[in-house]
Image (tube, grey):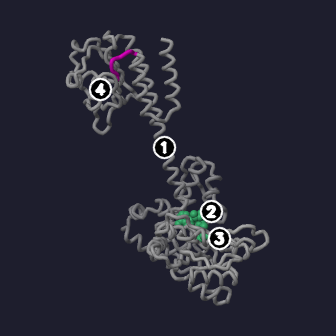
Amino acid sequence: MEEKSELIRDLTMMVSSVADTNNLLSLIVLATMKVMNAKAASLLLINKKTDKLVFHTCIGEKGKEIKRYEISRNEGIVGWVAERGEPILVPDVSKDPRWSPRIADSVGLETNSIACAPLMMNGEVLGVLEVIDHTDNEPMDGDDLARLQSFSDLATGLMVKAREYEEVAKENKFLKETMGSKHKIIGNSAAIKKAIDDCAKVANSKATVLITGESGIGKELFARLVHSLSPRGHKPQVVVNCGALPETLLERELFGNEKGAYTGADSRRPGLFEAADSSTIFLDEIGETSPAMQVKLLRVLQEGTFFRLGGQTPIHVDVRVVAATNKKLEALVEQKLFREDLFYRLNVIRIELPSLRERGEDVIILAEHFLNYYSMEMNQKPKRFDPDALAALANYSWPGNVRQLQNTIERAVIMAESDTITVEDLPLEIGEFQNKAIKVGATLKDAVDNFKKDFILKSLAFNKGNKTKTAKVLDIQRTYLSRLIKDLEMG
Ligand SMILES: Nc1ncnc2c1ncn2[C@@H]1O[C@H](COP(=O)(O)OP(=O)(O)OP(=O)(O)O)[C@@H](O)[C@H]1O
Ligand SMILES: [Mg+2]
């Protein structure tokens, strides 16, 4: 008895620590059979789809053959237990009308006594643990039933744990997806959809792409998108911030060097263009490059070759170039600050990203996205915006674009004292946009348009950017709402 209770204790410990549920359940059935000196033992679980009992584990005499069967609820003694959720001991099956000999007869298993205990969780039967006869053919008795019950409790504990694991795994998956969305492009506006479509269109070619637009708008995100949609997408993209390094360092980084090319160059070092061979190089802040560097870049773009610093042999690489800048390159060209020939080399395909102001209801969609993202990251309950805060976010002009919006929401999540983000959690200059005052002196049309715009934005905000819902509340057609958004230059 001592040894047996030790076994149970060990199992109990394992149940609370092991994640491999299936093996452990089988082990519990094995322990049940051994400890109880039973001829056979099985664990049957309810299949939720079919509502039938299927064998999870079936060991002992004829175990393999029996495992193929399914049992309806209410069939035989096991079915009775599954239906009632009560344990049962049947010392002589031949005298019990509930006994169904179907399986035992067809596999030829002689059965005299049987004990069954349900696996119960919150009143729900998960399955049944069953033992048949002692190996010495003595019938099962009341002590056996009590013992069986403790094993079924153990199995239940394990299954409860397994479900918790499943929940946690699901949560983690959700978390990962949200984290994965770090690079996901969020937005529903026509402008952003067009930019995404354009990226998809040009991804397949090797043509150089120039991404332009204000700062904080998502240029890096779109450069990543072009690369990831391209046939080179499975290789790592090489990212170089051309504005971050002084010219000589940038040159070394990009082109690498031969041994002895400069003081301290004690070995040959390949540069980033070589690292990007057969992949994509993203030249960020290309507008910041010096005239000398522009000449070198032009050569790589034209010929696909370059020299390592101090090198004599031209190196050839197959690199796709994506460049980005928040500078107006055309203006720089005019001022002779940027080489015209390089500009045309880069500007083969142009993707001009819209500012957040031009993206209408995307502000709300992005705000909700960042709200979920940061609540999750800070392990907080999901938060929501109150209507005034949403209206302020929707009305503000966002000179710093998505980056500014992102930082604002991150700060708001930190600041908020409850689950609701209010105007108080927003910086003053944004918060005051909750009620955009209509100035006296405007024409009636402008004032009405202003009101309409404000009202529609607030309504959209209140309905989390859902146009169908908003149209319903405003009691107008969805198509009319879309037209209003367009006419009022909100989308
Ligand atoms: N459409 C979008 N969906 C989700 N996140 C976005 C979107 N656009 C931008 N972001 C986020 O905003 C931040 C700024 O984006 P990114 O760095 O790509 O901007 P940028 O245009 O390169 O800015 P800069 O010119 O200042 O370098 C990033 O954290 C990015 O993930
Ligand atoms: Mg950038």
The answer to which of 192 and 253 lies nearer the viewer is 253
Vertical side of 446 occupied by 153: above or below: above
Instruction: Specify which label sits upstream in the sequence, 4 or 2.
Output: 4
Q: Which residue occupies 45% across, 71% down?
A: 200
Residue numbers of the magenta segment: 36-41
Residue type pointed to by label 2: Gly
Kindly report which numbered mark, 2 or 3, lies closer to the viewer in this rendering. Answer: 3
User: Alpha carbon of mark 1 to alpha carbon of mark 4: how far?
Assistant: 31 Å
Kindly report which numbered mark, 1 or 3, lies closer to the viewer in this rendering. Answer: 3
- 39 is within the stretch colored magenta: yes
Tell me the residue that label 1 is attached to: 169
Q: Is residue 112 visible?
A: yes
The answer to which of 486 and 292 lies nearer the viewer is 292
Instruction: Specify which label sits upstream in the sequence, 2 or 1.
Output: 1
Q: Position of residue 190 (x, y in %)?
A: 45, 72
Residue type pointed to by label 3: Gly
Left or right: 364 as drawn, with respect to 285: left
Tell me the residue that label 2 is attached to: 431
Tell me the residue that label 3 is attached to: 271
Residue type pointed to by label 4: Glu
Mark 2 falls on what kind of element? helix
Vertical side of 71 occupied by 392: above or below: below
